[in-house]
Image: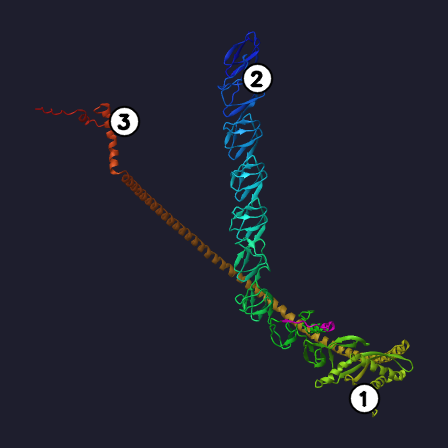
Amino acid sequence: MADSVIRIKPLFYVHVLDNNTNVTRVIVGPKTFTRKDHEKVVSGPSPMITLPPRYFCRIENPAVRDSKGQVVCDQYGQVRIRHGDEEIRFTQDPFPLYPGETLKEKPQALTVVPVQEALRIRATRDFTDKDGAVHMAGNEWLFKGPGTYEPRIEETVVETVQSIVVKENEALRIRAKRDCVDCNGKKRFAGEQWLVRTCGAYLPDVDEELVGRVQAIVLSPKNALQLVATDTHVDQFGRRHRAGDEWLVTMNDCDSYIPDINQTIRGIVEIQTLTNRQFCVVLNPYDPRTGLNRLGARELRKGECSFFLHPGERMERGIQDVYVLSEGQALLLRATEPMAKEESPDGKAHVAGDRWMIYGPCDFIPDVKLEVMETRQMIPLDENEGVYVRDMSTGKIRAVIGQSYMLKPNEELWAKPMSADVEALLQKEASRDKSAHGPRGKARDPTRVVSYHVPHGALVQVFDFEKRTSRAVFGPDVVLLQPDEQFTTVSLSGDVPKRENAIQTIAVFLGPDFMTDQIIVETSDHARLTLKLSYSWFFDVSPDDPAKALEIFSTPDFVGDLCKVLGARVRAAVAATTFERFHKQSVEIIQESVFGHDENGKLRDRVVFESNHLIVNNIDIQSVEPVDQKTRDSLQKSVQLAIEITSKSQEATARHEAERMEQEAKGALERQKLADEAEAERSRTQLLELQAQSIAVESAGQATAEARAAAEAANIEGQAAVDRAKLEAESHKIAEESLLAEQKAKNAVELEHRKKIDELEINKSRQLAEIEVQKFSQIVDAIGADTLCAIARAGPEMQSRLLSGLGLQSVMITDGSSPVNLFNTAAGLITPPQAPAPESK
């Protein structure tokens, strides 16, 4: 019987199955349920589903309800359910689950979507929402915050979408996943991209996806942004650009620029700045009126100015400085196009190709129709300097020497060609003339007049190819070659023995000088000897006869010819002489062979070569050495024997002289020893006398010093005691005086301090009293006399009104502690008799 009675608590329910009808019903508490025999409790007691505020739950197989919200039952009384369906229930009173209903998941809080967030919703079936919008299965949309999302069975939450914050100087690159309309109401096609530039939070729609962020490029007055259009479009400034167009965006357009989708950054263009001393020529200049480049045109831009090079523009030679011409400078100009008088810097009309010059001092900026070919300088020339100038009109070449010269427009410097041998000789001569600190090895300027310093006693031949004549120049002098003149070089034999072409020179020395040669001769008795001969020579020419001087150069190698001729004569003479005779009379034999005898049989003093006027006036035999070894050994032995005899004789003489000098030195030494010993004895006697005197002086001085020291010590000790007593008395006096002064100062300071404190207190009290008086006066003035009177009367009047309201004629209230004067109290308590009213007539 206990199992048949079920006590159902409040907010609980049970499911009871009627076995007769096979229908399950719900029994809701609070209730005591008595189960019948044909009934069975299927489940429970179970707690009802309780949903807190802002919660929901999902019910599977929910019961069917009518328009009033009542549960619909079938004909058998069984609750009808929607099988396979779900129902979301929001906050309501606790409710039971009907048979067949199932709680799919625990109650959950409603999703709160904050600001700048959204839920991506997808429809799982076709339905129409409460706003009348029709959603097909698969459609997606956003539920944007702030708000509370109430879920539906027909939709599901795919994800939470966060807002993307667009910062300053930043943009979002968005791509459409399918055809849609963007936030600005513009229709977009699938795959199309665009930029969102508005600063703030941006919430992408379901049909939009974020490609990336685009950072703005900050522009300054010194740079610009070069862009190229990838497609025909209209930019944010309203300008139309075709595909492939390039243009600049500067700070005049905007402070920072975000490239559009149809734009590509080509690069950053730096500003070009020209000072007032600079200019440039721009090729293909940009025309702002047409927005196109004038291809093939040239534009001159002068400073002071700043500009950006537009796409397609370039500077011809970069930024150039203004041509500053000083005195002695000029510019060679050429017209590239016809120029009128007004356009020409010299005020004359010119056709293309004309050449002229602008002379300094001045500043010059060439026009675009002009070409500056070169800057010319006044060439300063000394009296021994010059340049070769060629006239380009006639081709004539001339030398300008000894004056400063400026080339004319139709003239140019001409480089004079020289042979390699002459160049080497001139370079060698120039290097020898330079100082030790000067440049060496510097190439000759071929446009300068060739100059050669002819040394003293030398001769130079110069040949003129135009006139076919030669001229001789005697040193010391300077040779300046005309354009058609060349030096005549001479190749001479050199070294010992002589070899051909050993010396290359321009100048031939006239002497007198020496030349040395070495020859091999053979005597009649077949003794072969090597002779080293030196010839003294000179040329017998004079500057007064230049034609005779030029005959010197008729013999190409006068050194080799001279040595060959004289060597042949010496060989012939030695061949007819024996070795013994030649050894004794070599000088006479060689001189006779070289100079010969005159008609009188006398030895000549010179040899004259008439072809080139070369004269040999002396010959010197420097060495004679046999070629054969035996002959050389015999001569060596005889020479050594003579040397040995001479050396022994000199050795004996030197030894005898040394012995004599030795004996004289020994005698002088003995005499000096005796004199030194006598002097030493005299010095020893004087030393002993001085030692005795010093001992006596020392004893007397010691005794005197001890006595004086004792007296002085006693005197010092007494004086010190007196001084100490004086100092002690003085110190006591100073201490007492300092204590007295300190006490006086302390008393004075304390007195002064007390006076100041009292004065401060008095001032404080006076100021406080004044403040109180002023405060009271201001309060009284602010309140007013009428107000004070009203305040004073307020208490008695209030008491009077209270008493009159209570019907009391008089009353006194006291606390019993304050004394009360009752002497006059009765006067107020007893009402005086009133006079009778007059009778009316």
Crowding at mark 2 (Cα within 10 Å: few <14, some 14-19, many 20+) = some
**Magenta stretch bounds:** 411-424
Q: Position of residue 355 (x, y in %)?
A: 59, 69
**Pointer 1: what residue?**
604
Q: Position of residue 18 (x, y in %)?
A: 56, 10
Q: Are marks 3 and 1 in contact (CB under 8 Å)?
A: no
Is-magenta flag for residue 121?
A: no
Sequence order check: which comes first, mark 3 or mark 1? 1
Classify residue 368 by image quadrant: bottom right
Whole-number angstrom distance, CA of label 3 to CA of label 1: 182 Å
Quadrant occupied by the C terminus: top left
Q: Position of residue 591 (x, y in %)?
A: 83, 85
Residue visible at 50% across and 14% down in the picture? 30
Q: Position of residue 820 (x, y in %)?
A: 23, 27
| Count of numbered tags | 3
Q: Secondary structure at mark 1?
A: loop
The answer to which of 805 and 633 lies nearer the viewer is: 805
Task: Give the amino acid at mark 2.
Answer: Gly
Using the image, determine if residue 89 lies above or below residue 376.
Answer: above
Mark number displayed over residue 136: none
Task: Give the amino acid at mark 3.
Answer: Ser
Whole-number angstrom distance, CA of label 1 to CA of label 2: 167 Å
Mark number displayed over residue 100: 2
The answer to which of 381 and 141 lies nearer the viewer is: 141
Q: Is 587 displayed left or right of 371 in the figure? A: right
Sequence order check: which comes first, mark 2 or mark 3? 2
Q: Secondary structure at mark 3?
A: loop
Considering every residue shown, the one lying at the far left of the view is 841
Crowding at mark 3 (Cα within 10 Å: few <14, some 14-19, many 20+) = few
